[in-house]
Amino acid sequence: MRFIVYGAGAIGGVIGGRLFQAGHDVTLIARGAHRTAIRDRGLLVESPDDSARLRIPVVGHPSELGYEPGDVVLLGMKTQDTAEAVRALAASAPPDIVVACAQNGVENERLALRSFARVYGVCVVLPAAHLRPGVVQVYSAPVGGVLDVGRYPGGTDDVAPAIAGAFRDAGFGSAHRPDVMQYKYGKLLTNLGNAAEVVCGPGEGARDIAALARAEGLACFHAAGVDFAEADMTVYADVLNVRPVGGRRRFGGSSVQSLQRATGSVETDYLNGEIVLLGRTYGVPTPVNELLGHMANEMARDRRPPGLVAPEEFLAAVAARS
């Protein structure tokens, strides 16, 4: 089983690096300066306990690879980049290749299933960061994170347990879950706070706003009849041991990192936007998620830093729109 990690940023880079360290066959697909740094110097994986520079094979595009039976493609890019990535992959990879979505949100699997028959969801709980070319950080050790795997849209086979076993080899907690999408919907509720961190910055005010966004999400799930599994954070707390890397704590989640790197885009449309879509479909008001999505997208497009809006200013704007 070869793992082709398509999108070797924070999540993909850490997963690919740890799989490589565990002796698995790994190839990374990365872009721009990140790809150049990995090619020239290797991928540096930093953790609270150690760091390792790994000479992992890397290419810049799926068309540069030859594909073999048993290959597993792990998608690690943000959802706003998934459709383009799937098109590029479909143009060069066989249609029966395994595609596993190690991404936030619930849209990636649907996008992949349009082109590939063997699609898997991965529910990711992994405190990671990628802010510099050629470098990724994982903020938990010795267990790096939890990566539960299941066939999409459901069912069981021998592939998901094999992927889960490889993840465990690489130092992650991982279970085979036939109902993995219920867990990804549950994780989505947590990820609604990403945009609050973007708009207001990490802190108590952002957490309060995230709680309001989550309440809207729950109302939409109930109206739509969405089956979801609540994330039991006490279980993750027992498994993960989150600590600083190089004396620095992780600042914000994946969406905040997009603004820190000034990428020009953010995944909000597929997190808060998923709740807005459900709300508009089933007649549930979602003013908090709507405004979070609007502000986060605007800040990303303008390449502004995170945390420019005071929590009370945001809440006043929500009230004014209601």
Image (cartoon, grey):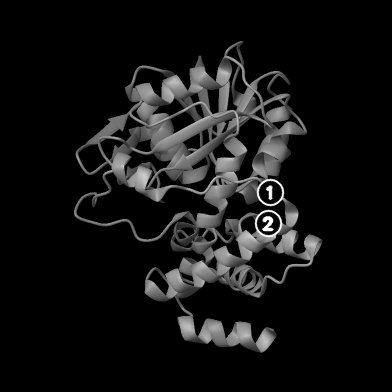
Q: Which residue is mark 2?
A: 222
Residue 2, position as x, y percentages in the image = 50, 17
Name above or below for residue 159 compared with residue 259. Answer: above
- In this rendered view, identify the residue nearer to me: 244 or 174: 174
Q: In which quadrant of the rendered image does the C terminus lie?
A: bottom right
As helix, strand or loop, the secondary structure at mark 2 comes to helix
- In this rendered view, identify the residue nearer to me: 6 or 185: 185
Residue shown at 72% from the left, 26% from the top: 116
Mark 2 crowd level (few <14, some 14–19, many ≥20, 10 Å Cα): few
Name above or below for residue 73 compared with residue 256. Answer: above
Q: Which mark is residue 226?
A: 1
Name above or below for residue 196 compared with residue 130. Answer: below
Say whether marks 1 and 2 touch (CB < 8 Å).
yes
As helix, strand or loop, the secondary structure at mark 1 comes to loop
Name above or below for residue 275 compared with residue 24. Answer: below
**Residue 129 shows in this picture:** no
Number of numbered callouts drawn = 2
Residue shown at 66% from the left, 75% from the top: 287
**What residue type is disc 1 on?**
Val
Q: Is residue 91 left or right of residue 124?
A: right
Marks 1/2: CA distance?
A: 6 Å
**What residue type is disc 2 on?**
His
Q: Which mark is residue 211?
A: none
Mark 1 crowd level (few <14, some 14–19, many ≥20, 10 Å Cα): few
**Residue 25 shows in this picture:** yes
Residue 234, position as x, y percentages in the image = 35, 48
- In this rendered view, identify the residue nearer to me: 230 or 29: 230
Residue 61, position as x, y percentages in the image = 60, 32
